């Protein structure tokens, strides 16, 4: 009887190559050692990639890193970065925060549990993450904490660089990964910003059951609605790669020409700075496609594309290492890795070695719950066909039309006028006030009080975009900001105002 069962199982197995060929079988068997090796590779390559790219993160905005520039890598570089700049690993320790929630509360952990865990953590955050943290600490719960009317950075890269854990724990099960992404990703993002995480998690899930990089890239994008800009941007990368598979720079120029406009994130508007999810996802995909399975080319290309040049190689490398496994990461890239694997990432009690074990544990449970099986020496994965997630779009009908430079502290009152339907004001990061101080300010629009705002000076509790308002009636508006409690030891600094109109502004020469 046992032999009969084994024979039936063998008949139902689907090899990785047959999956890519589109045959009808839906089960993939792999040994536990192979699964562990893929999970180990995913976490290790993320860490390698973010370390490799961290010195040039956002130093090459809207431009590529030229071939003649050497990007540092040497034995001991990982340990040096762990010790001197642990904040570079924000995309890792954010992932691990969510891994810990699953470990503590199980797969059914609610969105609020994930939100509370990172909102109350000690580490520094920026953009959509910090905006969501502020929202959560001030009573705006998920998914509203990531919704674009409450989060001016909703389209930013944040969840895209933190969704790895969801794909790693869902081998072959991209729909299950997207369910996790729905809970976690909407804490801090919406629209294209959320799609970035769904797509990354899908590629990781697929990377367990296919050894074809192009298949992983193309099958993963099926999760994203075709009418979204995110889908269209990544589809362009795929199309242009096929047209010119030997020149990544040609595709880089085409992507910039069509997709480099950032209309959401206030810090990236009217400046050569792009933290938008879709264009940074394009650099991830370029690294994967043009890297063609080679780790060095994958790391180098995704880094040399610029912009978020540490997170992008981390994601690309993590997906590739899931396909190939830890054992196939070249020794050149594993220099010094064993030295840091037992070390907890700062702000966590989790090391790489811990992450390997936890994700394997969680993956086995997800496999079991979703129609797969665990055997003495292996796992049988019920591979899912991708289901497109619902369509959502942020900043619809809002187009940047003007920048007003304030560049001064709010000591008492500031008033400005604009024509349009909305605005967002940058600031807060340079406030020299005591950490425990909380500014309080009123925001009036057309002489009506629309919001009384708490603005903590504490960097980890600050409101990343101190003042903003969208969906106003189109026309002339006056904004008056009034500080209620000036601080003798510091001030509330404001930067620029981004004004939004109903139609895009175009200057053709």
Image: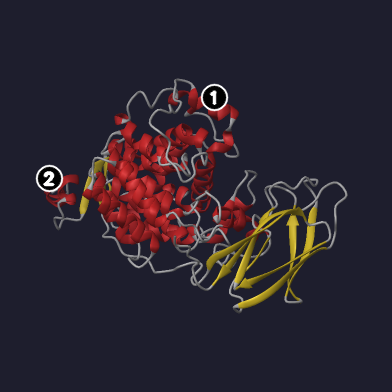
Q: Is residue 227 left or right of residue 346?
A: left
Q: Is residue 348 left or right of residue 391?
A: right
**Visible in this render: residue 364?**
no
SS under mark 1: helix
Residue 460 at x, y percent in the picture = 67, 48
Specify the farthest residue to the front. 509
Residue 291 at x, y percent in the picture = 29, 38
Nearer to the camera, 376 or 75: 75
Residue 3 disc label:
2
Specify the farthest residue to the right. 488
| Alpha-carbon span between mark 2 and mark 1 | 54 Å
SS under mark 2: helix
Looking at the rendered structure, the number of numbered marks drawn on it comes to 2
Q: Is residue 355 left or right of residue 492?
A: left
Residue 65 at x, y percent in the picture = 43, 36
Residue 113 disc label:
none
Residue 450 at x, y percent in the picture = 72, 73
Nearer to the camera, 421 or 22: 421
User: Who's the residue at 46% across and 26% down the image?
Assistant: 72
Q: Where does the C terminus fall, quadrant-wise?
A: bottom left
User: Who's the residue at 75% across and 50% down the image?
Assistant: 457
Nearer to the camera, 144 or 269: 269
Q: Is residue 415 left or right of residue 326?
A: right
Label located before the other in sequence (2 or 1): 2
Nearer to the camera, 483 or 185: 483
Which residue is identified by label 1? 80
């Amino acid at each position: 009887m046992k032999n009969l069962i084994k024979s039936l199982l063998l008949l139902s197995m689907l090899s990785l190559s047959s999956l890519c060929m589109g045959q009808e079988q839906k089960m993939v068997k792999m040994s536990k050692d192979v699964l562990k090796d893929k999970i180990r590779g995913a976490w290790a390559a993320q860490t390698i990639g973010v370390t490799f790219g961290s010195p040039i993160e956002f130093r090459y905005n809207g431009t590529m890193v030229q071939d003649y520039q050497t990007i540092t890598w040497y034995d001991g570089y990982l340990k040096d970065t762990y010790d001197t700049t642990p904040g570079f690993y924000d995309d890792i320790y954010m992932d691990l925060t969510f891994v810990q929630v699953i470990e503590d509360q199980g797969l059914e952990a609610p969105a609020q549990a994930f939100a509370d865990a990172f909102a109350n953590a000690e580490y520094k955050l920026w953009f959509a993450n910090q905006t969501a943290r502020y929202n959560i600490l001030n009573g705006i719960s998920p998914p509203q904490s990531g919704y674009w009317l409450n989060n001016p950075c909703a389209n930013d890269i944040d969840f895209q660089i933190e969704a790895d854990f969801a794909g790693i724990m869902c081998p072959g099960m991209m729909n299950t990964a997207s369910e996790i992404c729905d809970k976690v990703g909407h804490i801090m993002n919406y629209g294209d910003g959320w799609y970035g995480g769904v797509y990354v998690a899908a590629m990781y899930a697929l990377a367990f059951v296919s050894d074809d990089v192009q298949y992983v890239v193309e099958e993963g994008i099926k999760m994203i609605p075709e009418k979204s800009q995110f889908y269209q941007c990544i589809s362009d990368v795929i199309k242009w790669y096929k047209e010119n598979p030997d020149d990544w720079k040609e595709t880089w120029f085409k992507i910039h020409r069509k997709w480099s406009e950032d209309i959401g994130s206030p810090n990236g508007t009217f400046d050569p700075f792009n933290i938008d999810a879709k264009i940074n996802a394009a650099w991830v995909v370029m690294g994967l496609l043009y890297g063609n399975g080679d780790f060095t080319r994958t790391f180098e290309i995704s880094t040399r594309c610029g912009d978020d040049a540490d997170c992008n190689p981390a994601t690309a490398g993590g997906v590739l290492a899931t396909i190939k496994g830890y054992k196939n990461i070249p020794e050149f890239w594993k220099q010094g890795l064993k030295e840091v694997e037992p070390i907890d990432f700062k702000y966590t009690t989790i090391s790489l070695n811990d992450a390997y074990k936890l994700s394997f544990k969680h993956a086995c449970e997800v496999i079991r719950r979703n129609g797969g099986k665990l055997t003495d020496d292996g796992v049988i994965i019920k591979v899912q066909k991708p289901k497109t997630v619902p369509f959502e779009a942020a900043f619809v009908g809002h187009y940047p039309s003007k920048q007003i430079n304030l560049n001064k502290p709010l000591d008492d009152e500031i008033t400005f006028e604009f024509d349009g339907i909305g605005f967002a004001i940058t600031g807060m990061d340079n406030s020299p006030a005591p950490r425990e101080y909380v500014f309080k300010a009123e925001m009036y629009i057309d002489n009506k009080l629309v919001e009384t705002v708490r603005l903590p000076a504490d960097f980890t509790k600050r409101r990343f975009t101190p003042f903003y308002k969208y969906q106003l009636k189109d026309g002339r508006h006056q904004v008056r900001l009034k500080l209620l409690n000036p601080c003798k030891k510091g001030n509330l600094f404001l930067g620029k105002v981004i004004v939004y109109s109903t139609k895009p502004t175009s200057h053709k020469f």
